[in-house]
Image (cartoon, grey):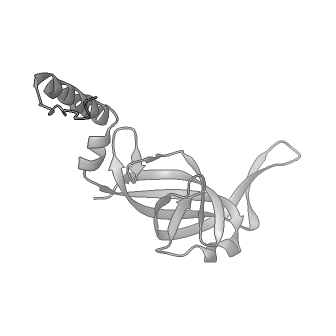
């Protein structure tokens, strides 16, 4: 019995080249169609947006600090940094016995308006924070800061100049 096994040396030929080229083309097409290349080459913009937190206790206003980060409650992604905060009395509409609707304010309750800045991209559909989280006027988001959980509605979103 012959125990000497001869090993055939691998030679790179045209068929191997075509296979490697086809694999590279498939990877490139998937990256382009999935937006992967655009995600890494697209310039980041500074997005500024304003949100409204409706009907919270006035004591909660002091828990919101300027320059603190705000996070999405769903996936804990950072939605930006709070740059400004204001409030006004929370309003409600009451129906009187004669059927008239009157706008009143609730004692101890306020509507808070926050201005938030984040890095992201802006396109015709709206803003994408960190290139992935979509935000636009009218969107409701469940979020939190260090000491407070709340829902807010986006009232304005734009690219900061």
Q: Quadrant of the N terminus?
A: top left
Residue at position x 58%, y 73% from top?
64
Residue 42 seen: no
Q: Quadrant of the C terminus?
A: bottom left
Question: Is 159 situated above or below 32?
Answer: below
Residue at position x 34%, y 35% from top?
34
Q: Position of residue 118 (x, y in %)?
A: 40, 60
Residue placed farthest to the front in the image?
Answer: 1
Residue placed farthest to the right in the image?
Answer: 97
Q: Position of residue 75 (x, y in %)?
A: 56, 53
Question: Is 150 situated above or below 66?
Answer: above
Residue at position x 15%, y 22% from top?
15
Residue 28 seen: yes
Count of numbered circles in the view: 0
Residue 124: image quadrant is: top left
- Front-lying residue, 41 or 96: 41
Question: Is 134 situated above or below 53?
Answer: above
- Front-lying residue, 21 or 160: 21
Q: Position of residue 123 (x, y in %)?
A: 33, 42
Residue 46: image quadrant is: bottom left
Report the side of 138 relative to 62 (left or right).
left
Residue placed farthest to the top in the image?
Answer: 15
Report the side of 129 relative to 146 (left or right).
left
Residue at position x 44%, y 56% from top?
49
Report the side of 31 relative to 106 (left or right).
left
């Amino acid at each position: 019995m012959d125990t000497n096994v001869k090993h055939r040396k691998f030679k790179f030929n045209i068929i191997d080249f075509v296979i490697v080229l086809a694999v590279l083309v498939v990877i490139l097409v998937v990256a382009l169609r999935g937006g992967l290349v655009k995600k890494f080459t697209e310039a980041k913009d500074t997005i500024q947006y304003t949100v409204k937190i409706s009907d919270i206790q006035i004591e909660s206003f002091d828990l919101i600090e300027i320059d603190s980060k705000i996070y999405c409650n769903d996936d804990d992604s950072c939605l930006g940094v709070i740059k400004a905060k204001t409030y006004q009395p929370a309003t409600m509409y009451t129906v009187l016995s004669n059927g008239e609707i009157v706008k009143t304010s609730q004692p101890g309750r306020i509507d808070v308006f926050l201005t938030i800045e984040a890095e992201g991209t802006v396109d015709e559909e709206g803003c994408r924070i960190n290139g992935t989280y979509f935000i636009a006027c009218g969107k409701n988001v469940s979020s939190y800061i260090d000491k407070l959980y709340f829902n807010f509605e986006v009232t304005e979103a734009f690219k900061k100049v």
